[in-house]
């Protein structure tokens, strides 16, 4: 793993964490409240601040990836054909929407329907942004990235990081149903990631696919990271189950949920970091050029 | 569409790398930056015949490539700043004043042509020795080749003289970018895939 990849790892994970938080917040917290016409609680300001903070961290690290950041404003000039240009534009639009949503949450928490629409729009922009991010990697010259596994991995990373973080914030506040839903997401996404792994590896190792070079790199050069990721997924599932069975119908009695929810989130975050580092090891040209 | 292109005779290239060195010299390139790269393709195998004897197949040839100034350049499409652009004459050039050093063109190019200059923080690549070409001279790599393996010229002339073959193992499928690179195949190239031949000097060329 090259040190030059760290800014990309942090950038992509931070943006996906932020988008994941917004999507899960919108679907699993705001939507049920909106349906039951419950007022928007001020305690969720913090969630928006974290989502905004993650997006800003992503923006900062995107600059660290550039060799010549002084020309960065020019990167918006090829939206017509460049997915990277579209991504940068998307990150700016998403961050601006998120900032607007967060400010509105603070200054006009009673904005109700407008606030909900703004959160919807921000979350939708986040979903589109993740698709754009995955398209950057889906290029013929990098066949190990050029598959459905790339967007799938990015979306799952966003959902699981967002769900597990919001589970932490739901302790003593959220409904039993939303806590259970978030715990199920926290468990099920790593399970799906583990289930997909053999399919991904067999695809990567197929002789017709660059002679199985991608799989060889994964298993010969990064075996420790490969196993570490498996262990972290399993830990995340175990902590997720622990959290799931700790949730009580009387949500004021949920202090015991803190430890498993925190451990589940930490395992998931660590797993996603290792996963993303391994993803960047697949930056291979099949022919070796 | 590119007006000019390169021709490489892989059946005659000795792998002396004079083209690579003269390119580095002409463009005053730092260590690690190679606008032109000579890849050594090698494959071999032992087979048992029906009579029980053992015979061997072996193939080894060299492939010298720079930037292919493609008709459908992946690097130009990928570049977020339009620093990588096609000139009216089809040459693909980098405007150093626009480049942000994101290295996305490096990912997008299937031939490894764009090279990252760490000191300048920008991408650089072969420009066909544009200054020489404007003076009516061939690029440095072409004029220095002792085997006369490399040729440079208008695409129509190269096709007329050598045919329209734009690939040899293990170059990528030319339909991806339509490179302005024309190749005479080494006779052993037809065996290369069967022998699972590979580039054996990857570290030399990439590091």
Image (spheres, coloured by chain):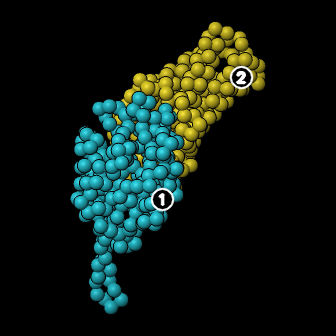
| Relative horizontal placement of residue B168, taking residue A111 as reference (left or right) | left
| Relative horizontal placement of residue B83, taking residue A41 as reference (left or right) | left
Disc 1 residue crowd, few under 14, some 14–19, many 20+, Cα 10 Å: few
Report the chain holding disc 2: A
Residue at left 25%, top 49%?
Answer: B22
Residue ID for mark 1: B156
Residue ID for mark 2: A117
Above-or-below relation of A45 to A9: above
Inspect this view and state whether residue A253 appears.
no
Helix, strand or loop for disc 1: helix
Residue at left 45%, top 45%?
Answer: B91
| Relative horizontal placement of residue B49, taking residue A193 as reference (left or right) | left
Chain A tint in image: yellow
Q: Residue A51: percent from the left, percent from the top?
A: 54, 23
A119 or B146, nearer to the observer: B146
B142 or A62, nearer to the observer: B142
Above-or-below relation of A43 to A210: above
Going by the picture, which residue comes out furthest to the top? Answer: A107
Going by the picture, which residue comes out furthest to the bottom? Answer: B51
Residue at left 39%, top 32%?
Answer: B96
Chain B tint in image: cyan
């Amino acid at each position: 793993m090259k040190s030059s990849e760290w800014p990309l790892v942090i950038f992509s994970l931070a943006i996906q964490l932020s988008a994941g938080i917004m999507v899960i917040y919108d679907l699993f917290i705001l939507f049920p409240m909106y349906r039951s016409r419950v007022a928007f609680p001020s305690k969720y300001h913090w969630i928006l601040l974290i989502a905004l903070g993650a997006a800003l961290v992503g923006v900062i690290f995107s600059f660290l990836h550039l060799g010549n950041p002084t020309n960065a404003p020019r990167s918006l000039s090829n939206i017509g054909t460049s997915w990277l240009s579209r991504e940068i534009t998307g990150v700016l639009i998403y961050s601006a929407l998120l900032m607007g949503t967060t400010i509105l949450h603070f200054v006009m928490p009673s904005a109700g329907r407008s606030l909900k629409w703004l959160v919807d729009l921000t979350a939708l922009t986040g979903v589109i942004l993740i698709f754009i991010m995955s398209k950057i990697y889906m290029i013929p010259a990098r066949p190990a990235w050029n598959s459905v596994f790339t967007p799938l991995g990015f979306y799952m990373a966003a959902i699981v990081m967002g769900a597990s973080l919001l589970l932490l914030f739901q302790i003593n506040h959220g409904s039993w149903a939303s806590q259970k839903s978030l715990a199920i997401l926290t468990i099920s996404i790593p399970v799906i990631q583990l289930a997909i792994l053999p399919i991904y590896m067999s695809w990567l190792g197929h002789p017709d696919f660059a002679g199985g070079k991608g799989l060889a790199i994964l298993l010969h050069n990064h075996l420790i990271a490969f196993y570490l990721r498996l262990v972290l997924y399993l830990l995340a599932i175990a902590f997720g189950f622990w959290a799931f069975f700790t949730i009580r119908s009387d949500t004021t009695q949920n202090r015991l949920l803190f430890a498993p929810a925190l451990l589940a989130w930490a395992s998931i975050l660590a797993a996603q970091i290792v996963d993303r580092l391994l993803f960047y090891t697949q930056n291979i040209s099949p022919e070796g050029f | 569409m590119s007006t000019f292109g390169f021709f490489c005779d892989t059946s005659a290239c000795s792998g002396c790398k004079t083209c690579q060195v003269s390119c580095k010299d002409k463009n005053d390139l730092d260590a690690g930056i190679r606008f032109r790269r000579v890849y050594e393709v090698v494959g071999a195998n032992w087979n048992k015949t029906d009579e029980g004897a053992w015979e061997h197949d072996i193939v080894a040839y060299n492939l010298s490539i720079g930037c292919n100034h493609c008709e459908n350049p992946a690097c130009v499409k990928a570049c977020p700043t339009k620093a990588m652009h096609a000139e009216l004459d089809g040459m693909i050039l980098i405007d150093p004043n626009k480049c942000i050093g994101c290295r996305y063109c490096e990912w997008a190019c299937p031939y490894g042509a764009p090279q990252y200059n760490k000191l300048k923080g920008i991408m650089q690549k072969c420009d066909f020795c544009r200054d020489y070409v404007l003076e009516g001279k061939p690029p440095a790599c072409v004029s220095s080749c002792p085997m006369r393996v490399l040729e440079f010229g208008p695409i129509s002339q190269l096709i007329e003289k050598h045919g329209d073959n734009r690939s040899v193992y293990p170059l990528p499928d030319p339909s991806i970018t339509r490179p302005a690179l024309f190749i005479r195949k080494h006779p052993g190239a037809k065996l290369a895939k069967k022998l699972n031949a590979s580039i054996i000097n990857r570290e030399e060329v990439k590091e």
